[in-house]
């Protein structure tokens, strides 16, 4: 019984190796690597499903640097969210007194998203 299992496993490895080495497989793989978009096409990555309006998150971006904290105000399904900008991310010289700036972020490209504790007022 053990010889049959070993032989069938070995036969499977040989078949897979021959399939991977065949010219038709290589041509098919090469064709799959090429992507072309029609003029005016749009590609978007989905917004992570765990994000919730009203909660605060710390986002880390591909360029590096410390995480930036934002409170989510609105969520779109295409990766964009509207956020309130936290004080640590704002230069007070450019913000009118008493206002809270907001901006749109594409969170689909964030490298890390961490939920933060709610602010205590």
Image (cartoon, rainbow, N blue to C red):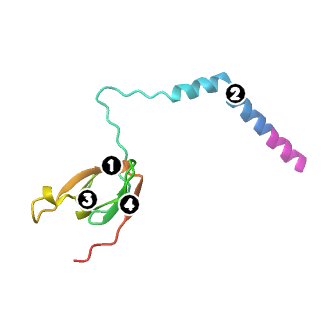
Mark 1 and mark 4: span between their CA atoms?
12 Å
Disc number for residue 79: 1
* Residue stretch rendered in magenta on the structure: 1-10
Residue farthest to the bottom? 121
Mark 1 and mark 3: span between their CA atoms?
21 Å
Task: State the residue position of label 4.
Answer: 50
- Mark 1 residue crowding within 10 angstroms, few (<14) / some (14–19) / many (20+): some
- Residue 108 at x, y = what percent? 37, 49
- Where 39 falls versus 105 (above or below)? above
Task: State the residue position of label 3.
Answer: 89
Residue drawn at x 70%, y 30% is: 19
Residue 1 visible here: no
**Along the polypeptide, which appears first: circle 1 or circle 4?**
4
Side of 27 relative to 14 (left or right): left
- Residue 81 at x, y = what percent? 27, 53
Task: State the residue position of label 2.
Answer: 21
* Residues at discs 2 and 3 in contact (Cβ within 8 Å): no
Question: Mark 1 or 3, which is nearer the eye?
Answer: 3
């Amino acid at each position: 019984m053990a010889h049959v299992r070993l032989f069938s496993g070995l036969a499977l490895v040989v078949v897979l190796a021959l399939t991977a080495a065949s010219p038709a497989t290589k041509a098919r793989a090469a064709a799959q690597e090429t992507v072309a978009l029609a003029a005016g096409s749009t590609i978007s990555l989905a917004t992570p499903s765990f994000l919730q309006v009203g909660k605060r998150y710390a986002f880390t971006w591909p360029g590096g640097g410390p995480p930036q904290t934002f409170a989510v105000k609105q969520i779109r399904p295409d990766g964009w969210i509207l956020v309130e900008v936290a004080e640590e991310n704002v230069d007070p010289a450019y913000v009118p007194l008493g206002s809270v700036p907001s901006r749109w972020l594409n969170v689909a490209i964030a490298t890390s998203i961490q939920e933060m504790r709610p602010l205590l007022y």
